[in-house]
Amino acid sequence: MSSFGYGIVGCGWVAPSHGWGVRALADEGVRLIAVADKDLRRAKHIAEEFGAQFATQAYEELLQRDDIDAVSICLPDFLHRNAALAAAAAGKHVLCEKPLALNVAEADEMVLAFERAGLALGLVMNHRYAADNIRVKRAIQDGAIGRILVASVVHSSALTGNDDGSSPWRGRRGLVAGGILTTQAIHFLDLLLWFAGPVSSVKAWADNLVHPRLDYEDTAALALKLQSGAVATLATTNGAPIMDDITGTRIELHGTEGHIVLDAGRVRVAQLRDGAALPEVQLPAPPKEAVGMFGVGHIHEIADFVRSIRRGDPPPVPGADGRHLMAVLSAAYASCNDDREVQVREHLPVYQQSSPKSQEEENAP
């Protein structure tokens, strides 16, 4: 199998999850070639841990390398656009951490640049790679609960990465896309839309109930009208003392022929139409030594991302989905400011991707 060079731009707390994802593909000829971070000490640490040949403070140097095919962008929100556009100009595929950009205009610019260059732009949505989430996605695709009528998410997590407010960019206007909605709840909004489809309009409320010194919300509630006609809600806070994104999350999906409840990442209730069943899903085991606070979803998504590039397929979580998330959240903030329902204007096909395939399924005749 031909070699495939990978780079990581940004060596903060999520970078090791990307490093493990690349290392898991070693048998498929994928290698971490270079890493970049303005803090050279951090870059050298990641390079040493994951066997990269080159560490630099300037990601432009990384992008100039001919032996790199794709990069992960693990930078603060306000740096996503510039780094992604530079990567597109250099001919590199990109997997970008969430949110895709600071706003819809930047997201549009990024999506268009990669379309014009014929390159893949993917978004990290690692929770799509939890086995029970995949089981639910496949059951819905098979019509196991009929047409979805009502859906909801309740999410609570204090995992902000900025417990003392000392971060120079987290929670700061102009440097991040938003608060709890864009930093943590975005994952579960994504799952909601992956299951039930895209949004047509939003009515939202948000406030700083626990962290008043930050510029963005720590608590919010969204009422969503979906393009299908279904209605959905999302309520979220990072003020409660739950230190992970899964334990305090519940997703409910109610359809014309049944309902499914996911609680703390597991299917707790599944009342399905006659003859339907939740499919079994077996994901490949990650490297035994893999560690990280974000679980193993990144490992599975990076594998899916690289394989999609090699097949010439769209990325598993395309940039268009990331753009739609930005449009929904921008509409939510506008609704909060104006106390009105706000339309979500979409010009791209979104949330069309099916559930991820295991390596065994990909190799099946």
Image (tube, rainbow, N blue to C red):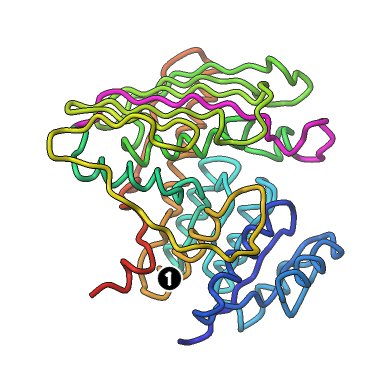
Q: Quadrant of the N terminus?
A: bottom left
Judge left or right: residue 361 versus residue 6.
left
Amino acid under disc 1: Arg
**Residue 174, relative to residue 235: is it above or below?**
below
Residue range highlighted in magenta: 147-169
Q: Position of residue 312 (x, y in %)?
A: 36, 72
Does 244 sit above or below residue 202? Answer: below
Q: Position of residue 18 (x, y in %)?
A: 62, 61
Instruction: Judge by depth and name the residue closer to the eye, 232 or 140.
Output: 140
Residue 188 lies, with reference to residue 222, above or below; the image says below
* Nearer to us in this view, 69 or 21: 21
Q: Is residue 134 magenta?
A: no
Q: Outermost residue toward the right?
A: 41
> Magenta residues: mostly which secondary structure?
loop
Please name the residue shown 55% across and 56% down the image. Answer: 298
Q: Residue furthest left?
A: 274
Q: Give the percent coordinates (x, y) of residue 187.
A: 51, 39
Q: Is residue 177 left or right of residue 279?
A: right
| Residue position for label 1 | 307
